[in-house]
Image: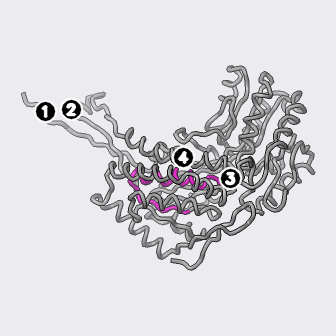
Amino acid sequence: MSSMTWQVLNPYDQECIGSVELVDWPQIDRWLDEARALHEDRQARLPAHERIAILQRASVLMRERAETLAMQIAREGGKPIIDARVETSRAIQSVELCIHELFASGGREIPMDLTQAGAGRKAYTFREPIGPVVAISAFNHPLNLIAHQVGPAVASGCPVLVKPAKDTPLSCKSFVEILYEAGLNENWCRFVPCSDEVAEKMVTDPRTAFFSFIGSARVGWMLRSKLAPGTRLALEHGGAAPVIVDDSVAHAKVIPPLLKGGFYHSGQVCVSVQRVFVPRAELPDFAAELAAGAEALTVGDPTNAETQCGPLIRPAEVDRVESWVDAAVQGGGRLAAGGKRTGSTLYQPTVLVDPPDDADVSRKEVFGPVVCIYGYDDVDAAITQANALPYAFQAAVFTDRMSWADYCVEALAASAVMVNDHTAFRVDWMPFAGRRQSGLGTGGIGYTMADMSEEKMVVVNSPSSVR
């Protein structure tokens, strides 16, 4: 093991709240050997009923420790405690969804007598674990993202090595330790905080059968280009989620969900509301209402129950968001709310009106508490602008006209379109996928379990019946 450590800082006050020791390559090399041997030894594989029992016990332990887990999320990740409690509940549900998927899983019959060539045969399929999984996770949902990557691996019968985000390793460590306490042998799940260089070596090793990545597009696509032949993968990156608002809908139905979708976790969500397109005649009133809502949000210590927006994960992120907003204003955008930092770790919920199309806030994922509003004269022009980026994830439409919603749903480049809801809506069993540069593959518990297993078919040539 390495003598190097990650110091874990509370992003609100920059106080050290813990540390984890980094794992070096020789140890990971041994663990990959162990994972491959576990997978190849069919006698060593855990039967489904044992995996179910482990996950059931893990769920019970998480429920018993829910408040401790939520406070850990708030302290290491800066997520307001009200939202950290929701994340903890979702993580518990994610574990339980793994169990549900095991009960619902199974093979299928393939009809053989559709042609004369197949007559006299029967065929069916079943699923096998794909092999060793390497998971690299992100900071913004430090417990539930781990549950989405590690839970399906355990449920599918795959050995898994998981590298948490450098800023938020404590929740990952807690989850892995709960699995051990629930009866999972350590050789099935390894907690692997390590340097980026070592992580790349682990990901691109030919012993890695499946690579699960949640994080920046730059890193994800780079690692994909270096994978060993045969390694399967799923990438989840970010976007710059668009919202199209119809002139038929009351602002009172739109503003509250946009405030939630835009400023939840201070915008540090891959499908956070970022670009809102409203009819130009309504732009002044709409911007004023959204700005008033943004200014009313409580910003501060994430462990306080009244806090709605906490800190950004690192002071450098505050610097970046501040520079992007300042450049957008200098380029002609109008600041309707916020636009200022509060110390080194907090940035005010910000509303920008008509920032330039070439500004960073219009072209890139802000990943901060910034919502941009653009006026449009023609909905097709708004849709064209919404679709113009190389990212596509979730989008939203607000309207009282179903035909208008249907038109936008068809035209928007997105893997999912929310009608009369914000772009950050998600439940853990639905498909969750980025298009274009926003990702590859589909997230969601059942979909990930399918990725981490492979279908095998059996064809039986039945002898002629004896009469």
The residue range painted magenta reads 140-163
Residue beneath disc 4: 441
SS at badge 2: loop
Residue beneath disc 1: 464
Q: Nearer the viewer, mark 1 or mark 4?
A: 4
In front of the other: 441 or 309: 309
Circle 4 crowding by C-alpha within 10 Å: few under 14, some 14–19, many from 20? some
| Residue 365 in sight here | no
Real-space Cα separation, disc 2 to disc 4, in angstroms: 37 Å
Residue beneath disc 2: 120
SS at badge 4: loop
| Residue 77 in sight here | yes
Q: Quadrant of residue 402?
A: top right
Kind of residue at badge 3: Lys
Mark 1 and 2 residues: CB-CB less than 8 Å, in contact?
Answer: yes
Circle 1 crowding by C-alpha within 10 Å: few under 14, some 14–19, many from 20? few
Mark 2 and 3 residues: CB-CB less than 8 Å, in contact?
Answer: no
